[in-house]
Every structure is written in C-alpha cells, then in structure tokens.
C-alpha cells in the first residue's frame, strides 16, 4: 500500500536542491511541479560519513527562495545522497523489544565499523527478521541533519521524513515489479558516488555507497563490486539488474549485464510517473526518488 505523505519532496545534495510536488495519477504518480536550484560549492564541506554544513546562510536563502517560488506549503519529505549515510545490515544475538533499548544495542554493534562515535549519529533501523535478529541500520551525523532541519523550520517547513535517495529509487522500482525469491542487483549511479545493493527476494543482503575518486573508472568499480558480490553472496543466478541515474550510457549497462549475466533494466522517470514537466532531464533520477517516497 502506498505511503501517505504531503506532496512536497526535496532532494538535497551538496551542489543542488531539487523540489518536486508529487500527485497521484490514474495509474502512476505524477510530477506536478519540479525545479532544481544550484548551490554554491562552499555550503557543504567534506566530513566523516556526512558532509558538514559550513554556510547556513546561503542554504537558508535558497530554501526561502524555493518556498517563495513554489507556493504555500509547510511539510516536506527530505531525501539526501546515499553517500551521506552509512547503511549497515547487522546480525545480532538478541534484540530488545523496547525501541530505545534496541537502538542502543544497534549503536553498540556499529562501534566496530563506524569511523565516528555512534552517539553522534542520527539512527533509524528496520527489523528484517527476528529469529535471528537481522537489522538494516541507516545512520548519518546528527549535527548536519539537525542543522538542515533547523533551516527548513526557520522557513516554515516541517521535515517529516529524512531518507537516502537511492533507497527511494528502489521503492519506486519494486512497487511495480512482481514478487520474486531470486536475486536482484541495484545500481544507483551519480557523478561522484554510486550505490550497489543486492536483494534476495524482498530481503536486502548488501547495501553500500562508495565515492568515485578518479583512481578507477566507473566500469572498473562495477567489475570490482561484481567480483565481491559473487564471492560473498554467491550471486550466480541473478534474475535482473536495475540501474538508475542521470546520463547512464550503454557502456555502463553493458558492463553490468556482462558481469552478472542477467538482463539490465535502465530506470527512467517515465517508468514511475505518468506525467512530468518537459524540462527535467538533468535531474530525472532525483524525481524518480521523489516518487518512491509514496510507494515504500
């Protein structure tokens, strides 16, 4: 069943802010309104896990201008780059029933893999299975998230949801796909980073976002990821691969198909939205993620 949220979604990155107003059509979602706002490159600075918000005044001004130009609204779902989060699939010996106690157990388990103190993280989690406890934990540096929320609040906008954009692209995909028990591979590719995920049926086995630093080509990174997935998860019988992103070319899809010996589906906005403005080609992937807010 589709989730019920206010129609406005913002996809925020270090160099842009995309606003989308989403409505329900006869069969698919509709992008009723969309606009991208460039951000100066000194607003965010590299940080451990999540970038630091260095210039609040400039981001605040963009948020105010966006709201002025897009009409009256006061609630938003906020999507951030996958690379701003750590997404961990954790297996535990036990998990307390109380949410606060469970969160502390999960934070403790993250100490082994996180480069920052887990107490500094904003944490959300989903229980994938209870016996044995298997958890999808999604975390980001709380100081940055809190600062962003404060700027939206100052503009009269309540942030009601914060999630990784790539996971919402996957939500948009799976809402339209038949149920399966086989393996599916998902790539969400951006200019400076990419996300790889493996799902066995509906269960995630692996999710990771990596930066592209120029030392290796994207095709080399894909081949390395494929080797790791085959060795670790025995992904030798893949039903389908999905790739999303702006400007994905045939070389990328060809590499993915060759590595996994499976058909590759290139996701576009028209696959998930029955209506959209005609000038959004540069940020179709962000709008695809916006539709996923309502289908997860």
Image: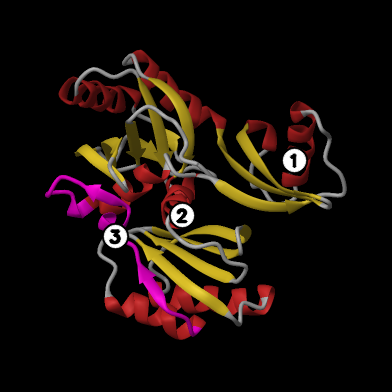
- Is residue 281 shown left or right of residue 127? left
State the SS at label 3.
Answer: loop
- Looking at marks 3 and 2 on the same chain, the residue that comes earlier in the sequence is marked by 2
Residue in the foreground of this view, choosing between 165 and 108? 165
Where residue 273 appears, as percent x and y from the top left, is: 28, 49
Q: Is residue 277 magenta?
A: yes
Residue in the foreground of this view, choosing between 66 and 130? 130
Where residue 228 appears, as percent x and y from the top left, is: 61, 75
Instruction: Give the Cα distance between marks 3 and 2.
Output: 12 Å
Q: Which mark is residue 268?
A: 3
What residue would you read off at disc 2?
170
Q: Quadrant of residue 173?
A: bottom left
Residue 234 in sight from this viewpoint:
yes
Where residue 292 appears, as percent x and y from the top left, is: 41, 45
Q: Which mark is residue 106?
A: 1
Determine whether 184 is above or below 112 in the image: below
- Is residue 13 shown left or right of residue 182? left
State the SS at label 2.
Answer: helix
Image color mode: secondary structure
Residue in view at x 37 percent, y 70 percent:
265
Which range of residues does the magenta coloring cover?
Answer: 261-282
Determine whether 247 is above or below 90 in the image: below
């Amino acid at each position: 069943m589709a989730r019920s949220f206010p129609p406005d979604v913002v996809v925020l990155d270090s160099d842009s802010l995309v606003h989308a107003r989403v409505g329900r059509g006869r069969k698919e979602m509709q992008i009723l309104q969309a606009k991208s706002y460039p951000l100066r490159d000194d607003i965010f600075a590299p940080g451990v896990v999540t970038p630091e918000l260095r210039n609040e005044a400039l981001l605040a001004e963009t948020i105010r201008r966006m709201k002025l130009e897009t009409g009256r609204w006061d609630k938003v779902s906020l999507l951030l780059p996958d690379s701003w989060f750590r997404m961990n699939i954790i297996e535990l010996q036990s998990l307390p029933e109380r949410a606060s106690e469970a969160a502390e157990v999960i934070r403790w388990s993250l100490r082994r893999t996180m480069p920052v103190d887990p107490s500094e993280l904003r944490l959300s989690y989903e229980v994938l299975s209870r016996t044995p406890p298997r958890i999808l934990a999604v975390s980001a540096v709380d100081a940055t998230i809190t600062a962003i929320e404060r700027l939206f609040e100052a503009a009269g906008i309540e942030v009601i949801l914060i999630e990784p954009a790539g996971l919402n692209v996957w939500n948009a995909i799976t809402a339209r796909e038949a149920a399966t028990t086989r393996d599916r591979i998902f790539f969400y590719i951006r200019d400076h980073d990419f996300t790889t995920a493996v799902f066995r049926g509906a269960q995630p086995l692996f999710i990771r976002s990596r930066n592209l630093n120029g030392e290796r080509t994207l095709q080399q990174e894909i081949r390395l990821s494929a080797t790791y997935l085959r060795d670790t998860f025995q992904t030798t019988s893949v039903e389908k691969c999905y790739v999303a992103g702006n400007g994905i070319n045939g070389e990328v899809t060809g590499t993915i198909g060759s590595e996994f010996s499976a058909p590759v589906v290139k996701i576009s906005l028209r696959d998930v939205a029955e209506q959209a403005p005609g000038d959004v080609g540069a940020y179709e992937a962000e709008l695809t993620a916006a539709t996923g807010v309502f289908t997860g």
